[in-house]
Amino acid sequence: MSKSGELDNYKLKIMEIAGRAGIITGIHNYCDRWCERCAFVSHCSVGIAEFETDGPRRDMLNKEFREHLSMVFQANYELIAESAREMGIDLDEAVNEYVKKTVYQEIGNFKADQ
């Protein structure tokens, strides 16, 4: 399967899992990554995705794992960007505004300290 096809399939799977009955929105924010021992894994989209999606062994030295992780990040970014567009949010504008408010302010504070 092509990288694009794998990405699209992963996005569809994530959306399908997130839409299931019984999923507790945001429960993964309290995750300690012990899915095997978690009493809430059947209510957690991240835990379900761990068990239902095929991925290589977790090992940063494993090239397949790093490529899979990169694809997971890309899929999630694309899903966030799609949702933002649907809500009328321009992510590029939001990032630029954040940079102006924080980074440039920090640079100014740095120069003032000199």
Image: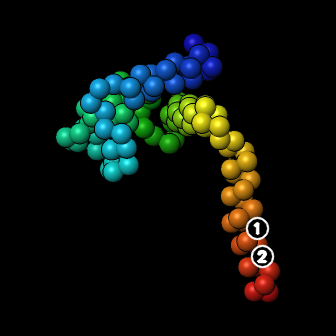
Q: Quadrant of the N terminus?
A: top right
Q: In the figure, residue 6 lies in which quadrant?
A: top right
Q: In the figure, residue 101 lies in which quadrant?
A: bottom right
- Secondary structure beneath label 1: helix
- Image vertical order of residue 37 relative to residue 55, above or below: below
Residue 18, position in %: x, y?
39, 29
Q: Nearer the viewer, residue 6 or 55?
A: 6
Q: How many dots with numbers? A: 2
Q: Quick check: 15 left or right of 42?
A: right
Q: Are marks 1 and 2 in contact (CB under 8 Å)?
A: yes
Name the residue: 29% across, 26% down: 21
Q: Is residue 33 visible?
A: no
Q: Nearer the viewer, residue 34 or 20?
A: 20
Residue 10, position in %: x, y?
50, 23
Q: In the figure, residue 34 lies in which quadrant?
A: top left
The amino acid beneath tag 1 is: Tyr
- Secondary structure beneath label 2: helix
Residue 100, position in %: x, y?
75, 62
Name the residue: 63% across, 19% down: 4
Name the residue: 36% across, 39% down: 25
- Image vertical order of residue 12 relative to residue 85, above or below: above
Q: Which residue is mark 1?
A: 104
Name the residue: 51% across, 18% down: 9
Q: Which residue is mark 2?
A: 108
The amino acid beneath tag 2 is: Gly
Mark 1–mark 2 Cα distance, whole angstroms, equals 6 Å
Q: Nearer the viewer, residue 32 or 83?
A: 83
